[in-house]
Image (cartoon, grey):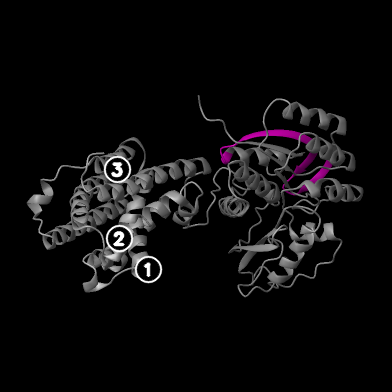
Amino acid sequence: MAAKLPTVLTIAGSDPSGGAGIEADLKVITAHNCYGMTTITALTAQNTTGVRDIHFVPKEFVQKSLEAVFEDIPVDVVKTGMLGSAGTIGTVAEVLKKYNVTKIVIDPVMVSTSGSKLIPDDAIEILQNEILPRTFILTPNIPEALVLLKKEDTIKSVDDMKALAAELGSMGPKYIYLKGGHVPMMKNGTRAVSTDTAEVCVDILYNSVDKHHAIIEKPFIDSKNTHGTGCSLASAIASNLAKGLEPLEAVKNASNYISNAISTAPNYGKGHGPLNHMKGVPFAPDRFLDYLLDHPKIKSVWKGFTHHEFVKRLGAGTLDKDQFCYYLKQDYLFLIQFCRAHSLAGAKAATMEDAAASARTVQLLYDESRLHIEYCAGFGLSQADVEATEEDVACTSYTRYVLDIGHSDDVLALNVAMAPCLFGYHEIGKWLMEDANTKHRKENPYYEWILTYASSDSYVESVRLGRKILEEKVRSAGPERVEELVEIFYQATKLERGFWDMGLRAGESV
């Protein structure tokens, strides 16, 4: 039986042009590999230029719709958008209380991107009294925050935004995610006088419990394609929460997803165009590797690999010589298979440039293998001794996993499968060079190994080239594909950790 998808219920209005409301919500939820459900609160006649009319769904029908969902399918997270009327807000509050819903993401939709008012004044007070105290994350933009607080716009800096977020926190939500897209900033934290001088967009995640502010900063994108950004962002946050991410990770990934969705927007419509919901990914351009290493599934296994006991003993110079020699012999055999994998990447390359990059990597791996032979000679092992070594099951498992990915999947997947080795060894080398417990030069028989992966020109070039290829290849991936790549990276990292386990076993049978 297939694993059940995380579930998200969106309570919002309908946008016939598809860029906002439940239409956008369902695209975002699906793109995040979650199962979306809806309750429609209002039908709108709108497009990218504005809202022409609104027909509110009777609150009695809204209640029936909500209860039909809650009585049948488990709901992991609820996201609300346009609630429309005071009666509907009261009804939604009653149902959420009845079913003891705790993970609620509230997008306090009050004004559309085109400037149309979407909620009557009498509904705002009910929202504040009945919904906000039960809210997990409230996601207002600055104009919405000012409406909720009945304040004028006096924002001049990031510090002013932090103060505004704290004021909203006093209304009851556990977290406030204050969006700064309407008030772009300079890099020095002051408000830009115009979009021409804007440099960054700053969002604030405020934890109302511990009074902590987290600042999320990204490059400012001056685009007309912003229809439904609030709906889409809140749905992305809700989806990330449903998948088990912590609030800070959920909003960071959602923010990056929206930035990419804006950057790749299809330019539809005569007004504020819609986003590209299916191509948005949860990381900033050229930051895929950072996303992987910060992913909740990968964090612990990555640390287990890069800070393994074998690594620590290498740094301290206390690793048993036989264990290091056994590792060296297996790593040489490993490099042979990795040369095959990179050759396979070259064979699958779609361009001459990609094929040439794979060829350069193979040459760098060959150079690395020569260093291994030199290391082995320093420990009394000849090349013949190394090549006569039987391949350990840990080496076989890892390398054949990579080759299997290469044969059954595409070049991007193959590069991801090889990434933990390339980037992990560089991180290990740098960490050991900085670690206070590391013995240097003559005090450590393994110092040259550490130095090679920390700073040798050839290995640093391998890392640079590998990252360039990886980041370029992942640009065309959608959110679901990204999650598949996360799984590949996770499995490969576990196998890397197993390689160190093998070293400590020093050839003992598994």
Is residue 244 in sight in this rendering?
A: yes
Badge 3: few (under 14), some or many (20 or more) residues near its Cα, within 10 Å?
many
Nearest the viewer among 313 and 51 is 313
Q: Is residue 99 magenta?
A: no
| Residue in the picture at 22% in, 43% down | 508
Question: Where residue 47 appears, x then y in whole percent?
Answer: 74, 44
The residue carrying pointer 1 sits among few (fewer than 14), some (14 to 19) or many (20 or more) residues within 10 Å by Cα, namely: few
The residue indicated by pointer 1 is 435
The quarter of the picture where the C terminus appears is top left
The residue sitting at 23% across, 67% down in the picture is: 448
The chief SS type of the magenta part is strand
Which x, y percent locates residue 507? 20, 45
Residue 377: name its quadrant: bottom left
Q: In whole angstroms, how far apart are the C-alphas of marks 3 and 1?
A: 28 Å
Circles 2, 1 touching at the beta carbon (< 8 Å): no
Determine which residue is flagged by label 3.
398
**CA–CA distance in space, label 2 to label 1:** 12 Å
Going 8% across and 55% down the picture, which residue do you hit? Answer: 382
Q: Above or below — where is 362 with respect to 192?
A: above
Query: At which x and y percent is residue 34?
Result: 59, 37
Q: Quadrant of residue 143?
A: bottom right
The amino acid pointed to by label 1 is Asp
In terms of sequence position, does the residue under pointer 3 or pointer 1 come before the other? 3
